[in-house]
Amino acid sequence: MKISPLDFLLGSELKVNKKFYFISGNEITLMEKIYNHILEKYKNKGNITLSKIDSIENFKSDIGLFDNKKLYFVKDCNKINKENLDVIRENDGVFIFVQENSSKTKRVKNIFLKDRDSYLVDCYELDKDSKINILNNFLNANNIKIEKDIFWFLVDKLDNRFMFLEDSLNKLLRLQSCDITINNVKKILTIDNVGKEKLFFSIFNKNANIVKMYREKILSPSDVNELYYYCKMFCQNIIDSENEDQFAKKIPVYLFRQKNFLLELFKKYNYEKKKKLLGLLKLTEINLRKENSLSLITGLRFLLKIKRISIS
């Protein structure tokens, strides 16, 4: 069964009562939000134990202590078929699959789409109607009233990526009602996107220059998260592309000035370097979740390690 991400996040009547959850799409901040939302729902229902498994092909059931609900996060979704889903269906646990869109995910999506024990959640950048829905829900939940011109300004200017939109709304929440003016909202929504991307495009500079620019641009844990997701997008494209032509097609049109840099960067990567880059992404994401107070240091180390891997 297919369900929209906003039904999951905003639909109070929706129950998490499925065996399988397949979260896919190309908006990674929304995918992560859905994943965490599912975990939170199960935590609210009682004790849970979360395990991460590489694949369901060779899955072996384990019995949770004290009758905890067992949730399994599955890393590799490419080899899923109806037969191996039927095998794990007999297990008492719940399985959550997260996979960014690729040429292989269409086949897997069709399996979950037809499965009655499944929710398929496709995550893409938010459109105008979605932002209206989210903003109305946020205002009602927090008993905030704003002028119409401010409302439509927010709809127009809020980021299409969920995590950044949510961050802006949380900043709005910290304002007193009398302070919610167009000028103050403009200050909240001032995000130097180009500046943060520029950090990635400067990784071949001297370390001292990178550190200086980083300290100017990255001032909060929110900035670190934003930088991480920019870098992850570029790094993931390098990892997933088998050749230069394939990689070139993934470069956004608006980055035409950086195209040569990105192509030169891609040429530096072989299979071993891609493995190291993937490991760095996973480790950094874990550290950012665990060490929020140290995220500024984590972000800088992440940037410098990308450079080290690239030039090694």
Image (spheres, helix red, strand yellow):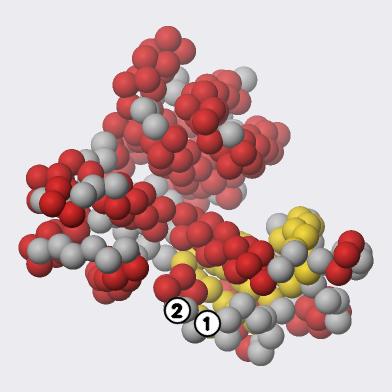
Name the residue type under label 2: Gly
Residue 197 in the image: state x and y as whole percent. 35, 35
Q: Closest to the observer: 263 or 28?
A: 28
Are there few (<14), some (14-19), or many (20+) residues within 10 Å of tag 1?
few
Look at the picture and state if 249 lies above or below 198: below
Looking at the rendered structure, the number of numbered marks drawn on it comes to 2
Q: Closest to the observer: 54 or 158?
A: 158
Q: Residue at x 53, y 73 (%)?
A: 121
Q: Is residue 280 visible?
A: yes
Q: Residue at x 67, y 72 (%)?
A: 45
Residue 42 in the image: state x and y as whole percent. 66, 69
Residue 260 in the image: state x and y as whole percent. 37, 34
Q: Closest to the observer: 6 or 15?
A: 15
Disc on res. 14: 1
Look at the picture and state if 218 lies above or below 137: above
Quadrant hosting residue 281: top right
Question: Quick check: marks 2 and 1 in contact, CB under 8 Å?
Answer: yes
Instruction: Please tell me whether mark 1 sits on a helix, a strand or a loop.
Output: loop
Quickly name the residue at label 2: 11
Q: Which quadrant, please, contains the N terminus?
A: bottom right
Residue 9 in the image: state x and y as whole percent. 46, 70
Q: Residue at x 34, y 33 (%)?
A: 196
Q: Residue at x 85, y 76 (%)?
A: 91
Name the residue type under label 1: Leu
